[in-house]
Image (tube, rainbow, N blue to C red):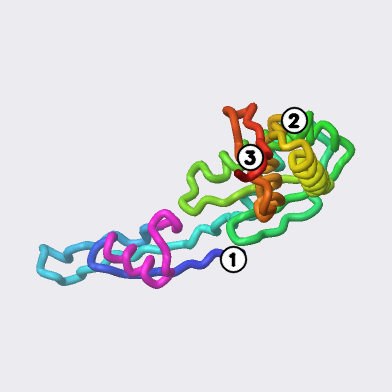
Amino acid sequence: MEAQTVEKRGKSVEEAIDAALLELGCDRQQVSIDIIEEPSKGLLGLGFGKKSALVRATLIAQESEEEAVTKVLKKLLDKMNLDYRIDKIDREGNQFNINLVGKDKGLLIGRKGETLNAIQFIVSLIVNKARENKVRIALDVEEYRKQRENSLVELANRLSDKVKKTQKNVVMRPMNSQERKVVHTVLQNDPQIITYSLGEEPNRKVVIALKK
């Protein structure tokens, strides 16, 4: 992107800078300032030869949110020496949905998605560290999460049927918050079933029970 530059005069340097910021429509931290001429009072303070301040303000190219997310993700994965490629990045509101592909699929995902969750958490933490408007990162590897979600939907339906037949609660294995949300969502409209979470992270579990 071509840098946008303006030159402005003012009685003082600060006044000239304010005029430049007004024309550029930005904040002080978004520009670099060069002072071309300092103001002077003129000969013997009588005004003869008096000069105003002249500054040049250049708008600094701002890194987009997508560029920031991509840069952090690539830097982290490169340090892990993983074979990967960013397949696509889609944005939905303040969330970036990122899908990775590569030979190291298993290493990227890890045991039950633990490595994938950790990478997602670290990238989100770094990207949002100094950002006023927070963004969400949803990281996937060759649609692993989508396949996992489909499996969870099937499992939740099977277990709810089991609860109805046996009249006994079922406690699922520990899952992360995203996986628990899938189970809660798929069963929330079942008139006979209620779900709730039990335990502390990282061993928090979903309980499927009959409504009383």
Residue type, label 3: Ser
Q: How many marks?
A: 3
Relative side of 168 to 204, left or right: right
* Disc ID at residue 80: 2
Q: Which residue is mark 3?
A: 177
Residue type, label 1: Glu
Q: Secondary structure at mark 3?
A: helix
Q: Is residue 164 shown above or below 16?
A: above
Counting from the top left corner in percent of width and height, residue 161 is at 79, 44
- Residues drawn in magenta: 14-33
Give the residue drawn at x 69%, y 53%. Answer: 190
Give the residue drawn at x 73%, y 50%. Answer: 98
Which quarter of the rendering shows the C terminus?
top right
Res. 58 visible in picture:
yes
Q: Secondary structure at mark 1?
A: loop
Q: Earlier in the sequence, mark 1 or mark 2?
A: 1
Q: Earlier in the sequence, mark 3 or mark 1?
A: 1
Image marks 1 and 2: residues in contact by CB distance under 8 Å: no
Marks 3/1: CA distance?
44 Å
Marks 1/2: CA distance?
35 Å
Q: Which residue is mark 1?
A: 2
Relative side of 18 to 144, left or right: left
Q: Nearer the viewer, residue 154 or 111?
A: 154
Give the residue drawn at x 68%, y 49%. Answer: 192
- The picture quadrant where one finds residue 94 is bottom right
Q: Earlier in the sequence, mark 3 or mark 2?
A: 2
- The picture quadrant where one finds residue 9 is bottom left
**Dot 3: few (<14), some (14–19), or many (≥20) neighbours within 10 Å?**
some
Which quarter of the rendering shows the N terminus?
bottom right
Counting from the top left corner in percent of width and height, residue 96 is at 66, 54
